[in-house]
Amino acid sequence: MPLGILCYKCTKVSQPIMNLFNFFRIIPSLAVLVLVMPIIGTGFFPALLALVILAIPPILINTYLGINNIDGSIESAKGMGMDYKRMLRTIEIPLAMPLIITGVRTSAVEVIASATLASYIGAGGLEILFLQVLV
């Protein structure tokens, strides 16, 4: 979420970061698991890393789009003398929250669907991943 806010505030940084994470989004989840396996090995940590890589793009993209689609509310806040931090806290994030929650929901579905593939790299089944995270 902070990276999505940074992409909105700094337009020079926005294009390379969004392109990178859109590239991560098109890679199939099994391919991410297979690409991580030679670098880190097998087990729980590579599966967790691959699942985090798969979870970030929808949240980042929806945070950026949610804050970018806010219209006239910011202009009136600037006119009243609000600083950027307060505008972000009180106006921009609450108005962007429906899209941010949609990104979190999409990420959760993708991670749960991809966690079943983690058994191919020796991370155990889906229940083992949940038990290791909870314990």
Image (spheres, helix red, strand yellow):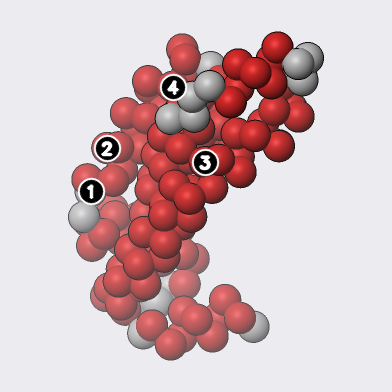
Q: Between disc 2 and disc 4, whose residue precedes?
A: 4
Image-quadrant location for residue 19:
top left
Q: In the image, residue 34 lies at what x, y percent?
A: 26, 59
Name the mark nearer the viewer: 3 or 2: 3
The CA span between labels 2 and 4 is: 14 Å
Q: Residue at x 52, y 41 (%)?
A: 96
Mark 1 in CB contact with mark 2 (< 8 angstroms): yes
Marks 4 and 1 sit apart, C-alpha to C-alpha, by 21 Å
Q: Are marks 3 and 4 in contact (CB under 8 Å)?
A: no
Q: Is residue 70 visible?
A: yes
What is the three-letter code of the residue carrying label 4?
A: Ser
* Residue marked by disc 2: 23
- Where residue 96 is drawn, which disc sits there? 3
Give x and y (percent) for residue 59: 45, 47
Residue 14: assigned label: 4
Label 3 and label 2: CA atoms lie apart by 24 Å
Identify the residue under disc 1.
27
Residue 103: x %, y % from top left: 42, 52
- Amino acid carrying label 2: it is Phe
